[in-house]
Image (cartoon, rainbow, N blue to C red):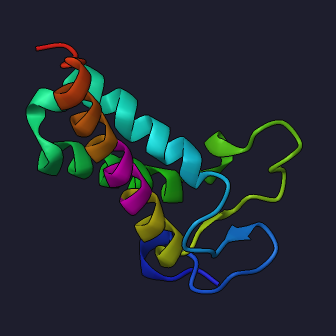
């Protein structure tokens, strides 16, 4: 069942409905890496870029099927997309913490 402009409204076969999952680690890593390269844009702009990615992912889920492991993937629930943005933000803030402690300021 399709919900708000492509988001799934329930969790079922091929639908990622958990707030956090194994892919949350990838979103934390993405936040850290994105912070290193374009952290100078600030948290709000970087989070907006990640939200744009989440929207894109809902309209083109076939681009995010990894081999046969995700062959049934049809998208995420809104709850999972919110969790992905939270995980991204944690990663970005981790980059901020590391850049302050160890001078890993990234590109400017």
Q: Nearer the viewer, residue 77 or 107?
A: 107
Q: Quick check: 75 left or right of 3? A: right
Q: Position of residue 58 (x, y in %)?
A: 51, 59
Q: Nearer the viewer, residue 100 or 11?
A: 100
Q: Is residue 5 above or below residue 52?
A: below
The image quadrant where one finds the N terminus is bottom right
Q: Residue furthest right?
A: 68
Q: Nearer the viewer, residue 59 or 93?
A: 93
The image quadrant where one finds the C terminus is top left
Q: Is residue 58 above or below residue 25?
A: below
Residue located at (27% from left, 46% from top)? 93
The answer to whether residue 87 is magenta is yes
Residue located at (22% from left, 42% from top)? 46
Q: Quadrant of residue 45?
A: top left
Q: Position of residue 35 (x, y in %)?
A: 27, 31
Q: Residue furthest front?
A: 101
Residue located at (69% from left, 81% from top)? 11
Q: Position of residue 8 (x, y in %)?
A: 58, 77
Q: Nearer the viewer, residue 97 or 88?
A: 97
Q: Main secondary structure of the magenta part?
A: helix
Q: Residue furthest top?
A: 107
Q: Is residue 81 above or below residue 79?
A: above
Magenta stretch?
A: 86-91
Q: Quadrant of residue 64?
A: top right
Q: Quick check: 80 left or right of 92? A: right
Q: Quick check: 58 left or right of 97? A: right
Q: Quadrant of residue 15?
A: bottom right
């Amino acid at each position: 069942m399709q919900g708000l402009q492509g988001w799934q409204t329930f969790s079922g076969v091929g639908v990622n409905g958990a707030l956090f999952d194994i892919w949350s680690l990838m979103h934390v890593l993405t936040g850290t890496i994105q912070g290193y390269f374009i952290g100078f844009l600030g948290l709000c702009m970087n989070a907006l870029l990640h939200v744009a990615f989440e929207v894109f992912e809902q309209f083109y889920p076939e681009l995010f099927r990894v081999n046969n492991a995700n062959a049934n993937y049809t998208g995420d629930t809104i709850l999972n997309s919110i969790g992905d943005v939270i995980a991204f933000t944690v990663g970005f803030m981790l980059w901020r913490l590391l850049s302050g402690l160890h001078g890993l300021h990234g590109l400017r």
